[in-house]
Image: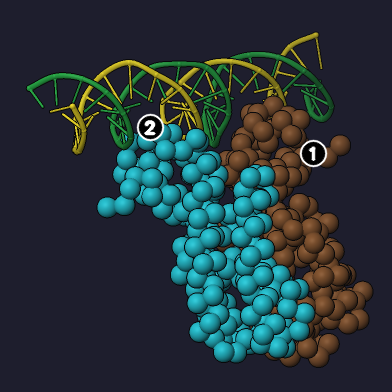
Chain colours: A brown, B cyan, C green, D yellow
Amino acid sequence: MASVRERLLEAAAELIAEKGWGAVSTRVLADRASVGSGVVHYHFDSTQAVLVQASVGALRAALAGLPDVLESSSTPDQALDALLTALDDAGGRELFTETFLAATRNDELRQAVGAVLAEFRQVLASWLASHGVPTPEQTAAVLAAAIDGLLLHRALDPDLSRAFVVPVLGRVLR
Amino acid sequence: MASVRERLLEAAAELIAEKGWGAVSTRVLADRASVGSGVVHYHFDSTQAVLVQASVGALRAALAGLPDVLESSSTPDQALDALLTALDDAGGRELFTETFLAATRNDELRQAVGAVLAEFRQVLASWLASHGVPTPEQTAAVLAAAIDGLLLHRALDPDLSRAFVVPVLGRVLR
DNA sequence: CTCGCGTTTGGACGATCGTCCAGTACGATC
DNA sequence: GATCGTACTGGACGATCGTCCAAACGCGAG
């Protein structure tokens, strides 16, 4: 069984995606991790701190998986498809959107998210550059934003499948 | 002075963008509208109902402005630029993202947002079609999602200006 | 002036919030 | 077996939550 600290972080990531950042309370969090409510403030300074660490951790985990996803793709369209698939699996789709939104209202979180996003763009840009995509930095930045928007819209509209999206969004990679 | 009902809806739209959907409370809402706290439940069934009506109203208002924005553009890139400008001005950038996110957790809101989104896509698709953009329906759907993602990322990264974005995203319109 | 009605107020209610803390459980050390 | 420190429990605290309601207000009709 994972440590209590890890269980709390896992529970936090689940609950942010499920109920929204503002609706994750100390007791709901402790219940989901199957621990007493007091343990949250034993391992963390505040309930907000758990949410910040959990969401940033999820972002970093997704970033760590990026090189593998890109390595296994030989064309830009394949990479786009693989990217969408990978992000779909990585925790609830809503987790990333919730984290970005919370980052606009919390300076510490904004800095951490900004750092992860910058590295995401850099990794993506260098792959794009080595595969002949023009203006790789700008393309990577816009692509990152577009993918975030797609994660959000797909939660509302199941028709927005990868097969539907890739042929269109793939045009920015030419 | 606008009616109390209208002031409450305005205040709700402001506060959703400012503090997040889950952090708009009955009393904060009443304070912002400069009314007593009880008046919220005189005009509306619940605090959630105010948020739903306010956010859907803002979405519809943005939709109503779309034809004018498109009419005044002659090229796809111009339209994209005008679209980003218009949405920047329409209430806090975070309002749309918050609304979409809340819609994934509230069936009534999901339906209303889905209807507005469908009409947005349809209007945009027919403009794209008449300006020679291929696969206009799919392009409109992906463009709508990409624009939402850009609104979110721009809140975190001021470098993501229109001049930066349009040349890249404009490639999907070719 | 007085009535009646739509509007608004501010406080009461129980539930839940974040945080804190006295107390318990338990393995390691002597 | 006694002692200790870490990990954890569950309840107490005051603040705030959504909702409801008795009372007061403003104003046109009679």
Circle 2 chain: B
Mark drawn on residue B95: none
Image quadrant in which you'd find residue B125: bottom right
Question: In the displayed structure, does residue D3 sit left or right of residue A72?
Answer: left
Image quadrant in which you'd find residue B159: bottom right
| Residue A169 in view in this figure | no
Question: Looking at the picture, how far across and down is residue A101, in whole percent?
Answer: 59, 57
Give the class, few, some or many, for how many residues have Cα within 10 Å of label 2's Cα (few <14, many ≥20).
few
Q: Nearer the viewer, mark 2 or mark 1?
A: 2
Mark drawn on residue B38: 2
Between D5 and B136, the residue placed more toward the observer is B136
Between A144 and B144, the residue placed more toward the observer is B144
User: Which quarter of the image is occupied by the N terminus of chain A?
Assistant: top right
Residue at position x 34%, y 45% in the image: B4
Question: In the displayed structure, does residue A13 sit left or right of residue C19?
Answer: right
Between B109 and A22, the residue placed more toward the observer is B109
Circle 1 chain: A
Residue at position x 38%, y 50% in the image: B6
* Residue that carries the numbered disc 1 in the rendered image: A3
Residue type marked 2: Gly
